[in-house]
Amino acid sequence: MDFAADYSRSLDPFPQYRAMRESSPVFQDEQSGSWHVFRYDNVQRVLSEHATFSSRMGGDDPSETGQLFAASLITTDPPRHRQLRSLVTQAFTPKAVDALAPRISALTDELLDGIAPAGTADLIAGLAYPLPVIVIAELMGIPPGDRDRFKQWSDVIVSQTRSGAEDADHHATNVEMTGYFLDLIEQRRRQPGNDLISNLLSAEIDGQKLSVPELLGFCSLLLVAGNETTTNLIGNAVLSFTEVPGTFERLLAEPQLLPQAIEEVLRYRSPVQSMYRVAAADTALGDVQIPAGAPLVAWIGSANRDERHFTEPDEFDIDRGPSRHLAFGQGIHFCLGAPLARLEARIALEATLSRLPGLTVAAGSRLERMDSTIVYGLKELPVTWEAG
Ligand code: HEM
């Protein structure tokens, strides 16, 4: 059995996680050799104890992580990680993110204008997918005329993460996109603007700047780490809200509850279900010995349902209060895009609630999980509402 792949198919992997937390909280998959970690305390340790659990995946790792996050930052350890992170943080400030709010609202409205009159749509294709792609394009300063190309590249990259297959199309796209980013970087070097790439070019720490390959790596990391995850946060939120009667009405009447409802979605249906590490030295998790060099999979999706940490973990409860979920990771690799993801989700969901009244999942639709062991979300989310 390919252990992780087995978990990727189900929209409800949570009973399996629960069984593993009980019977084999630290479990070695004989076939792949990977150690799978299921309980909150251990997942937290694996994610945050960077000296023991390294993020360096190596260039020859053919695993899904290798493809998904084939980039600097997320796959480096200190001291290099600290330098890269400080450089990128200079460009990715809370102020820069907050300044995007009016644009995110306008883009959301445009997308909703496109679907609102119909009374029915796939909410992933109509809103949750395009919104983060366009926001990232704007953030990077992609000229509006090139946005369609950028969107096509994202489509190919996303279809690869959604289907799990890498093909010739994907390769050609990578080559084309790399060429495009190289040109853009050169342009911004000559003529800096008020965009992320220009800011990254000028950011400096300890007398060092980002190299061009690092800049490129960061651009593609943003595309993958930032888009698919935010898409799924929005989709998973709509699904979770429709499952508990009265949630939509309540959030519409009290939109100030949206941020806490979004935190509960992050816990309950974490868009990133697992992250990878490698043991840097012999170590122990509970009474299980982990040898140096062992690959580990930290199951965030399981930690966030751990009954040792959360009461009634399988209840979706927007009144749960601060829950210290691990959906954005923890420690030095804590998600850089968390403020942006939260902002986009809040704006998109608030507009969806008010503009698509009576929103429900379309009767008879068969919801399917996208094919990925890391990312958790729906392939499509067919919904209906009262149009006009
Ligand atoms: C709901 C949406 C998102 C979720 C659930 C999510 C989840 C995560 C997680 C779990 C990590 C930690 C990885 C680790 O410990 O190895 C991470 C790191 C990261 N995320 Fe996100 N992410 C989201 C959105 C975004 C967005 C919108 C961006 C950027 C635009 C982004 C950029 C990054 C980057 C650059 C890192 C690497 C940080 C580092 O290694 O220091 N993410 N994300």
Image (cartoon, rainbow, N blue to C red):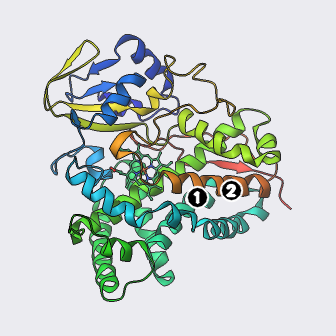
Task: Tell me the quarter of the picture where residue 222 sits.
Answer: bottom left
**Badge 1 element:** helix
Amino acid identity at mark 2 = Ala
Q: Nearer the viewer, residue 184 or 208?
A: 208
Residue 125 is marked as 1
The picture places residue 317, in percent across and down from the top left corner, at 67, 30
Q: Amino acid at mark 1?
A: Ala
Instruction: Establish whether ligand 1 lies closer than 8 Å to the Cβ of label 1.
Output: no
Look at the picture and state if 106 lies above or below 10: below
Pointers 2 and 1 in contact (C-beta within 8 Å): yes
| Mark 2 to mark 1 CA distance (whole Å) | 8 Å
Q: Is residue 82 visible?
A: yes
Residue at (50% x, 67% y) in the render: 96
Q: Place residue 259 in its image quadrant.
A: top right
Depth check: 206 or 157 in front?
206
The numbered dot on residue 121 is: 2
Q: In percent of the image, x 52 and y 29: which residue is there? A: 12
Residue sticking out furthest to the front: 206
Q: Residue furthest bottom?
A: 190
Query: In the drawing, what numbered circle is on residue 361?
Result: none
114 on left or right of 131: right
- Mark 2 burial class by Cα count in 10 Å: few <14, some 14-19, many 20+: some
Q: Is residue 124 visible?
A: no
Q: Quadrant of the N terminus?
A: top left
120 w.r.t. 99: above or below: above
- Residue appearing at x 62%, y 48% in the figure: 381
Query: Horizontal and vertical percent for residue 8?
Result: 41, 35
Residue 293 position in % (x across, y down): 14, 32
